[in-house]
Amino acid sequence: MRRTIWLSVFVIVFVWTAAAQPQIAADGVLNAASDALIGWPNSSIAQGSIFSIYGLNLGPSSSPALAYPLQTTLGGVSVQVVSGSTTANAIPIFVGPDQVNAVLPGSTASGSATITVTYNGQTSNTVSFQVIANSFGIFTVGSTGYGTGIVTDANSQLYGVNSSAHPGDAATIWGTGLGASLGDDGSAPPQQIDMPNLPLSVYVGTQQAIVTYRGRSGFTGEDQINFVVPAGITGCYAPVALEIGNVVSNFVTMPIAPAGQPCPDAAVPHPNSFTGNITLGRSIMIGSTTITTDRSQAYFGNPQILAFPYVPPLFGNPYSLPAGTCTGGVTFPLIFDVLGTTLDAGPVITISGQNGSQQLLAPGYDTQLGGGSGTNPQPLYLSAGDYTVSGTGGTRTEALANAGPFSQKFTIPQPLTWTNQSNISTVDRSVSLDVIWTGGDPNGTVQIAGEVQIPGSVLSVVTFLCNVRTSDQHFTIPAFVLLSVSPSETSTDTLWLSSISTTAFAAAGISLGTINSIVTIEKDVIYH
């Protein structure tokens, strides 16, 4: 009897699963390479491009092999697109329970369109998306839309940290979204025809590269852009982006080194190593009033690095973009460290200087040191001058759980002054923007970033970041970087400038310790 009951339950569950209706997620139609979020400037789907559909019960557990001629049904899955007065079937090239990749017909009309997925006779809900002539996405190694891009050498080998590109190399970007092209019907591999009339630019760092080919690869919907690696930029995580008209791709990275050398960046901490980071920051927020606050924050432990380049703007910039370059796109909510293992560094870290002593309290050592809002702000503490930071170390008895005692002198430099901030209130995203400053640590780093509200949300994200030598005293944010920013929905978006000075310290139990002195000036602006 018991076996009969189990069999009956199995049959019921099986029938229900087989008959489950496909469900497309809200805002679940994205560029298959960039995964650009709906509402951002590069989120529309280009004619003839590969796009992804995310949801539930969309297809079988494994995707059948592909062969030409490609069909409009794969593994029992078909995709129907309605745009304007026309209805067309997209070409599915990968099908699974929670994701379907398909090629949008090149003849699909621009503008608002709708899509449905049919699997085993069951049709999904209808979801809207936008169709555009050109909107490029660069494929990435992690299939995330950010991080290391699929950029290969003349032999189609992926560039890596130990096999870097060199100035003058012939390189290829792989992606999708150049626009409609001959052969998009999938009847045969597409013709590899150059599209020189596209208003297309490739940027490596902030330099425009020479493009020698832009068109289809040997597969339907997949594009390749051949270019020459420009001189004047090196780094393990040099940013790369592509612009067609005023639509900018996702930003990815590639390693570039001087001829015959490896890329020059310092090694990123091993995922199994333990690090310590103490940040002493002054925040100056310029709005209807100006609020200045001194704060501390620290972590000790095993950081899980979620994305590259390793650019944690709140905690300094030890491993980052090459100086004089920028990265953009909606990647920054994902790049902060998450501690896999937390070390005990003691209950208190003490900082001493010309304005007396302050105690930074565990956990997090997140302590307000001075200033702030209100009618009676505290006196500011982090003035320029010499300081000592020290800790007693942890006291836990568990193995690998303690950071040892330490004491380190460091200097807070003269503060940075953002000299032209009063002239910047509205940012025209189509025009390059000059940012000028004085002061700061001449051996330090300045980060310039934009923070905008997520379209349709109350949340804000840092959506572009530039890394500059403090001694340059000036930087021009290129228009192609600003175009990656979504236009402001409110007047609460910001542009900020951070001066960063870093001093190393040593303690038992950690492989790297850094003290970061940061001054951040943040101003309300409108991006349009």
Image: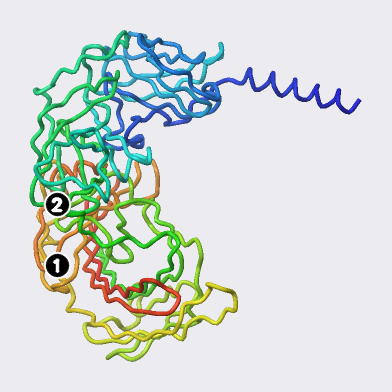
Residue under pointer 2:
260
Q: Which amino acid does the dot numbered 2 rest on?
A: Gly
Percent x, y of residue 252? 26, 43
Determine whether, in the image, residue 183 is placed left or right of residue 505.
Answer: left
Residues 233 and 41: in front is: 233
Percent x, y of residue 43? 31, 33
Residues 421 and 110: in front is: 110
**Reading the chain from its start, which is encountered first: label 2 or label 1?**
2
Residue occupying image coordinates x 28% and y 81%? 382
Question: Quick one: SS at disc 1?
Answer: helix
Residues 294 and 143: in front is: 143
Residue 250 image-quadrant placement: top left
Percent x, y of residue 272? 45, 62
Question: Separation of disc 2 and disc 1 at Cα?
Answer: 30 Å
Determine whether, in the image, residue 27 is placed left or right of residue 385.
Answer: right
Instruction: Point out the image quarter for the N terminus.
Output: top right
Q: Which amino acid does the dot numbered 1 rest on?
A: Thr
Instruction: Point out the image quarter for the C terminus.
Output: top left
Question: Quick one: SS at disc 2?
Answer: loop
Q: Are marks 2 and 1 in contact (CB under 8 Å)?
A: no
Above or below for 209 versus 255: above
Residue occupying image coordinates x 29% and y 66%? 316
Residue under pointer 1:
470
Q: Which mark is residue 315?
A: none
